[in-house]
Image (cartoon, rainbow, N blue to C red):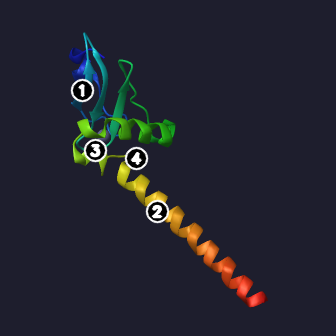
Amino acid sequence: MKRKLLHLLVCPADDCFPLELYVFEETDEVNAGVLFCSRCLRWYPIKKKTPELLHDKSRVQSADLAFLCAWKRFLPQKIVTTGKPFNLNSATENHLKKKRKRKMKRVKESALVVELI
Ligand SMILES: [Zn+2]
């Protein structure tokens, strides 16, 4: 993505502009980075020089989280921990919820076994 195109890009969720630009790798163009909407807190990856300005429903959570994880040290906390539609806090929360649910299921199963004995 050419930096000079930044002023043409709007957030697909709320048409807000300009978007904030965070650059991870740059040659003649931004190779990798993030575009951030300060109004709705959505972030959009720039991969292989291409900004992916997609609506939430078109985004792939696992790919976005992997991208976020790989570049988190270059990003401000507002994106890493509270950015939308996905951030590493919600990923951790979801992971912990699933873990708790699995543990509860095991507890219930063992309680059932105790009842049966
Ligand atoms: Zn927005």
Find disc 1 in the rendering and name its residue.
Answer: 23
| Residue 98 to residue 48: above or below | below
- Queried on whether the Cβ of the residue with tag 1 lies below 8 angstroms from ligand 1, the answer reads no
Dot label at residue 86: 4
Point out the tag, 2 or 3, that comes first from the N-terminus: 3
Q: Is residue 87 above or below residue 63?
A: below
User: Which residue is at 37% across, 41% downward?
Assistant: 69
User: Which of the marked residues, 4 or 1, is nearer the chain's N terminus?
Assistant: 1
Q: Where is residue 95 in the image (x, y as percent from the top left)?
A: 48, 58
SS at mark 1 in the image:
strand
User: Mark 2 — residue?
Assistant: 96
Whole-number angstrom distance, CA of label 3 to CA of label 4: 9 Å
Callout 3 amino acid: Ile
Q: Which of the two discs, 3 and 4, labels the residue nearer the N terminus?
A: 3
Question: Which residue lies at the image location 63% right of the left edge and 72% below the top edge?
Answer: 105
Look at mark 3 in the image and give the residue it sits on: 79
Vertically, is 112 above or below 88?
A: below
Give the foreground label among 2 and 4. 2
> Outermost residue toward the top?
28
Q: What residue type is labelled 1?
A: Val
